[in-house]
Image: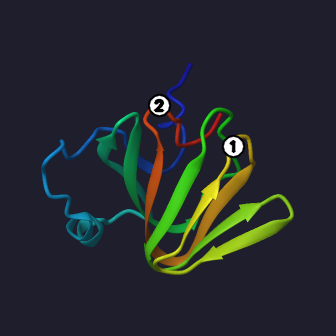
Amino acid sequence: MADPVSAYPYETRMNILYPAMEVIDEKAIADACEYKWFNQTLCKVNESVVRMAVIEGEYHWHKHDEDDEFFYVIEGELLIDLEGKTVELAPRQGYVVPRGVVHRTRAPQRTVILMVENAGIIPTGN
């Protein structure tokens, strides 16, 4: 069976970039990003990870059967499509998508976000 992450046209890096007790420079990573859809795991906190994404365009519809997902906008605008509604997030706003809820994220222009989720989550969904 193919790796569920590499089967999609997104640059998704699951490696933990920063160990504990190191300064995390999210801005430097975002500024250097050349991808339209980039996701990098920054650090691990207990059994969760903090990921940073630079996105433009739309992700596919998916869900996470066992995991909640938290999105926080640093810059740009994030749209989270749910069945029957769209949530719009501006910088410094966040939103939790509960486990089992079908959703997709979209960004009409370059947007930088943080996500907090279980370390074992498959970003592309179940």
> Front-most of 98 and 84?
98
- What residue sits right under mark 1 in the picture? 63
Q: Which residue is mark 2?
A: 120
Bin the neighbour count of mark 1 within 10 Å (Cα to Cα): few under 14, some 14-19, many 20 and up. many
Q: Residue 29 location in percent, x, y?
A: 24, 63
Furthest toward the front, the residue is: 46
Q: Quadrant of residue 99?
A: top right
Query: Which residue is pictured at 69% across the width and 43% down the height?
Result: 63
Secondary structure found at label 1: loop
Residue at (23%, 67%) from the top-left corner?
A: 32
Instruction: Give the residue at the far left of this rendering.
Output: 22
Relative vertical location of residue 31 with respect to residue 1 in this rendering, above or below: below
Drawn side of residue 123 relative to residue 45, left or right: right
The kind of residue tagged 1 is Lys
Image quadrant occupied by the C terminus: top right
Left or right placement of residue 77 versus residue 100 in this view: left
The kind of secondary structure element at disc 2 is loop
Query: In the depicted view, which residue is nearer to us: 108 or 27?
Result: 27
* 57 vs 119, nearest the viewer: 119
Residue 91 relative to residue 34: left or right: right
Within 10 Å of the Cα at label 2, are there few (<14), some (14-19), or many (20+) other Cα atoms?
few
Residue at the image position 20 percent from the left and 64 percent from the top:
25
Amino acid at circle 2: Gly
Give percent across and percent down for residue 74. Answer: 41, 74
What is the C-alpha distance between the residues marked 2 and 1? 14 Å
Report the residue that reaches farthest toward the top: 1
